[in-house]
Image (cartoon, rainbow, N blue to C red):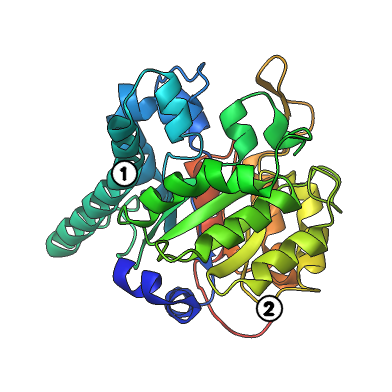
């Protein structure tokens, strides 16, 4: 898929989506699962720390999501930045190699999944954990500038008065270039907290040495605006205007807000809408923990999904605190996928 998606476009992503029956399933929370497997993520690099300490765990989590039904897996590069690795003492070359490694691990997991599919088919096994072989995309994650700062500003979009458009483009440029050349099928610009950063991403995608498509997903804490208070309609319009953006939507947002946000995005966007909310819990950036006062159980999370589809979304997954069980529930909800009209 890499060659096709990087060459232009949206038409190839549309074909992928059509091959999935008009509905594609994205993976779920990465950090939650890494911690469940024993990883210690108490570090400014967060999940990207495992690229250094335990890449086998990252590979396993990717594989778990594929076996749960994901059509798209997202690399462990959300908090992986050249600046962050350099602060840990790595050289520029080593930092760039770690970015590439995040995509390589996801591609390895995809290959392992295909091998398992092939063996299951040859042995004619009835193995409920191994789902049918299908087209699978690898999306290279790019987290916000606030994620690099690790100070909670990814949840507020408040970077202060000294951060302007050029500052953000300079911060992200080399990282985006590396990931665009890494073998990923597309880039996932995730948890975008403000209009300025969305504009920076859109302009970087248009630079001559970035030959890849992307999706944009924003986060909201009130169901009306992105977390900075910027207009969701204005943010979605930036994604809609870019020929390199193949889908636009919402991630890391409580499920209760999603349906209204989809309807808002549909006012300005004709591109496919992608939705992968968190569990509904609230992250406290001071104590760096999730507060379990508003989360929803897997069955409740999954119960929302068909309403999101009816509202206009086409791609579904989970963000923080969701698991392979969540994703398998979504897979089973759409087990007979169809592109038929709503």
Q: Residue 93, position in %: x, y?
A: 28, 34
Q: Nearer the viewer, residue 215 or 72?
A: 215
* Element on which disc 1 rests: helix
* Label 1, residues with CA under 10 Å away: few <14, some 14-19, many ≥20: many
Q: Which residue is mark 2?
A: 270
* Label 2, residues with CA under 10 Å away: few <14, some 14-19, many ≥20: few
Relative vertical location of residue 212 with respect to residue 31 in this rendering, above or below: below
Is residue 170 toward the left or the right of residue 197 in the image? left
Q: Disc 1 vs disc 2: Cβ atoms closer than 8 Å?
A: no
Q: Which residue is mark 1?
A: 100
Mark with earlier residue (1, 2): 1
Q: Distance from label 1 to label 2 (Cα)?
A: 32 Å
Q: Nearer the viewer, residue 8 or 296?
A: 8
Residue 250 seen in this snapshot: no
Q: Residue furthest left?
A: 122
Q: Residue 162, position in %: x, y?
A: 73, 34
Q: Nearer the viewer, residue 32 or 231?
A: 231
Q: Residue 259, position in %: x, y?
A: 78, 60
The residue at 54%/70% (across/down) is: 23
Q: In the drawing, what numbered circle is on residue 181?
A: none
Give the position of the N terminus as an image quadrant: bottom left
Residue 252 occupies quadrant:
top right
Q: Nearer the viewer, residue 292 or 140?
A: 140
The residue at 54%/44% (across/down) is: 170
Relative vertical location of residue 79 with respect to residue 43 in this rendering, above or below: below
Is residue 231 toward the left or the right of residue 336 in the image? right
The residue at 67%/23% (across/down) is: 151
Q: Residue 272, position in %: x, y?
A: 61, 72
């Amino acid at each position: 898929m890499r060659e096709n998606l990087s060459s232009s476009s949206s038409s190839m992503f549309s074909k992928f989506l059509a091959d999935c029956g008009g509905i594609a399933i994205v993976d779920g929370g990465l950090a939650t699962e890494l911690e469940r497997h024993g990883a210690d993520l108490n570090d400014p690099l967060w999940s990207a720390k495992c690229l250094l300490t335990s890449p086998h765990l990252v590979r396993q989590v990717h594989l778990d999501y594929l076996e749960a039904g994901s059509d798209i897996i997202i690399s462990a590069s959300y908090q992986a930045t050249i600046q962050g690795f350099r602060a840990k003492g790595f050289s520029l070359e080593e930092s760039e190699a770690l970015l590439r490694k995040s995509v390589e691990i996801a591609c390895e997991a995809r290959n392992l999944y295909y091998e398992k599919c092939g063996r299951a088919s040859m042995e004619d096994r009835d193995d409920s954990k191994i789902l049918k072989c299908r087209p699978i995309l690898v999306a290279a994650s790019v987290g916000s500038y606030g994620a690099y700062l690790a100070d909670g500003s990814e949840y507020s979009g408040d970077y202060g008065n000294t951060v302007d458009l050029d500052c953000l483009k300079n911060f992200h440029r080399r990282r985006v270039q590396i990931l665009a050349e890494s073998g990923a099928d597309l880039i996932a610009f995730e948890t975008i907290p403000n209009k300025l950063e969305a504009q920076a991403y859109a302009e970087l995608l248009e630079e001559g040495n970035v030959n890849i498509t992307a999706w944009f997903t924003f986060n909201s804490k009130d169901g009306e605006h992105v977390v900075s208070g910027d207009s969701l309609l204005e943010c979605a319009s930036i994604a809609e205007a870019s020929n390199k953006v193949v889908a636009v939507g919402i991630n890391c947002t409580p499920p209760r807000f999603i349906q209204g946000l989809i309807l808002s995005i549909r006012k300005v966007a004709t591109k496919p809408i992608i939705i992968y909310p968190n569990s509904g819990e609230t992250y406290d950036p001071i104590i760096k923990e999730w507060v379990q006062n508003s989360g929803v159980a897997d069955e409740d999370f999954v119960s929302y999904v068909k309403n999101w589809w009816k509202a206009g979304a086409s791609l579904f997954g989970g963000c923080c605190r969701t698991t392979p069980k969540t994703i398998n529930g979504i897979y089973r909800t759409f087990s007979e996928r169809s592109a038929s009209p709503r």
